[in-house]
Amino acid sequence: VAVFTAVDSLNNKIRKEIDSFAGSGVLYVGKWPWLMQNNYPWWKYLNRPEMKFTEYKYLKEHLENAEAVAIMDNGRSGNVSRGSNSINANLTGSSFEFNKISSIPIHDGRYFLPIESENGSYVCIIGAKISEILFEGRSAVGEVIKVNGIKFVVIGVIDKKGEDMLNFGGSTDEKVIIPYTTYATVFQNDDPSAVIAIKAFNNDVGQEVLEAEVSGMMRSLRSIKPKQEDSFSVNRLDGLNQFFDGIFAALNIAGALIAGF
């Protein structure tokens, strides 16, 4: 019984962390699949084009079955400093709609304004650990920090979360969120690694209607012929959940064998 209880508890924790990271009812369109197909040539994924800002704008303006569309890039780290205090942080560039995709609980200050996102303002939202190290208990809001030597004004501090079991996307406590247009100009260096996140309406169970519309629109945007493979991946929570379903099924079998002995 103890074995099965532990497995269930672990399963629930991982599910909650996946939901927190990816958001409920959200599709992620990117270059890479979250789960690789068996024996699929990896170089086909490597040679796919990166997601473009123009593709994000087109999907945002034309999708009929999406509640929100955001673009983000969180594949970089950088030195964040103020005076003699510094910390290595995870950098995320995101468009204004990111807070509709994934919850960003602000402890102090505020979230981006649409104009800050669109105009590429040098503002940022920082994690709780960054605030603690750089400001030592004082309010960070309105203060200037340097990210890789570039000045940004802190407009918000995220609630302290603590360590996650899987730590998808890096801890929010050590994260700096920057408007995507600013991030692209300053940090991408012609090497983008963006993902487009699209939230379905609540009545689109399984996001099947949205996925069909997104896939059709992306194939049209990239002029993919009917018999050609997609040059992008549409990822969803279902894929990760199925992966962990297999793991926990094996753990339950192992638990049953232990109980038998």
Image (spheres, rainbow, N blue to C red):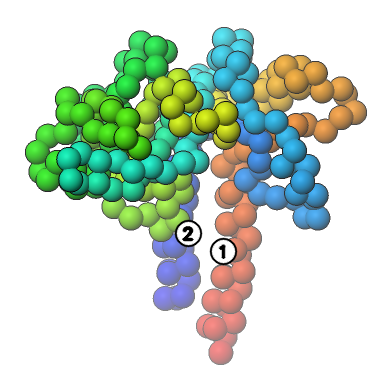
- Determine whether 244 is above or below 207 in the image: below
Tag 2: Cα neighbours inside 10 Å, few (<14), some, or many (≥20)? some
Which of the 4 image quarters holds residue 118? top left
Q: Given the current orientation, which residue lies at the most extreme left position?
A: 138
The front one of 138 and 84 is 84
Q: Secondary structure at mark 2?
A: helix
Q: Given the current orientation, which residue lies at the most extreme right position?
A: 227
Residue drawn at x 17%, y 28% as measured from the top left: 143
Residue type marked 2? Asn
- Determine whether 235 is above or below 227 in the image: below
Query: Is disc 2 in contact with disc 1, using a CB cutoff of under 8 Å?
Result: yes
Q: Which mark is residue 248?
A: 1
Q: Earlier in the sequence, mark 2 or mark 1?
A: 2
Residue drawn at x 62%, y 18% as measured from the top left: 55
Residue drawn at x 58%, y 33% as measured from the top left: 191
* Residue under label 2: 11
- Determine whether 63 is above or below 90 in the image: above
Badge count: 2
